[in-house]
Structures are given as structure tokens and as C-alpha cells.
Amino acid sequence: MPCRNEAIEYFQENGLIIAPSKAVNAGGVATSSLEMSQNSMRYSWAAEEVDAKLKVIMKSIHDESAKAAAEYGLGYDLVAGANIAGFKKIAEAMIAQGVI
């Protein structure tokens, strides 16, 4: 369940690791994307194969979030890292398209 900012601060102050809701939601989005890919290519993946593909996607999201947090001196703050990684990805895409 999503938490208010005060709850997140409390959890973090007490040493708990928070999985950012945007990253958690990405699991559902990724599963839908895998399903659409499977349907459009007329593939039929076993549940284990879908799970393996989803695991790779979610591990990448975790790793990018952890890397971004560490890069900006925030330790293992996955919430901040997910925000930073997401912002950087959008900014890089905008620059690549000549928007800014």
C-alpha cells in the first residue's frame, strides 16, 4: 500500500527499506507489456518464462534505483533513487529528441 510521506520518513528513520510505489507499479505495467508482446507475436510463454522475464525487468529497476541513490550520496534510499533514475531517463529522452 502507498504510504504518506510522514510514514515513509518514519520507516526510513527506523532502518526499514521502502520499495517505491512507482517501481512496484512498474511490475504490473511490465506484466501487461509482456502479455501484449506475447499476444502480438502470437507467442505462448509458460508462466515460468514470464516470471523470469519479469524478474529481469524488476531487478533492473531495483539496480538503477540503488545506483542513482548511491550516485547522489543518498545511500540505499530506493524511493529517492527511483525518482532520480526516472527523471534522468525522461530528461535523456527529451534531449535525444531535441526537446531541450
Image (cartoon, rainbow, N blue to C red):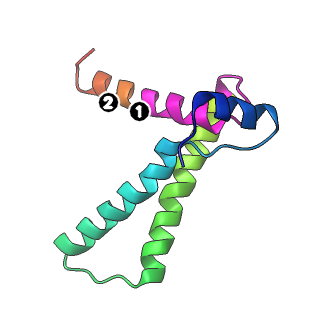
- Above or below: residue 35 compared with residue 30: below
Q: Which residues are magenta?
A: 71-89
Which residue type does callout 2 highlight?
A: Ala
Residue shown at the point (33%, 66%) measured from the top left: 34
Q: Residue at x 47, y 65 (%)?
A: 54
Q: Residues within 10 Å of mark 1 (few under 14, many from 20)?
A: few
Q: Give yes or no for residue 93 being in the magenta stretch.
A: no
Answer with left or right where residue 22 lies relative to residue 100: right
The residue that mark 2 highlights is 93
Residue drawn at x 36%, y 29% is: 90
Prevailing secondary structure class for the magenta stretch in the rendered image: helix
Q: Which mark is residue 7?
A: none
Q: Is residue 77 magenta?
A: yes
Quarter of the rendering containing residue 49: bottom left
* Image location (x, y in percent) of residue 2: 53, 43
- Element at label 2: helix
Q: Element under label 1?
A: helix
Instruction: Locate residue 30: give its quadrant.
Output: bottom left
| Residues at circles 2 and 1 in contact by the CB criterion of under 8 Å | yes
Residue 95 x, y percent position in the rendering: 31, 22
How packed mark 2 is, by other alpha carbons closer than 10 Å (few <14, some 14-19, many 20 or more), is few
Note whether 69 is above or below 39 in the view shown. above
Task: Report the number of discs.
Answer: 2
Q: Position of residue 97 (x, y in %)?
A: 23, 26
Q: Which residue is mark 1?
A: 89
The C terminus - image quarter: top left
Residue at left offset 40%, top offset 58% = 28
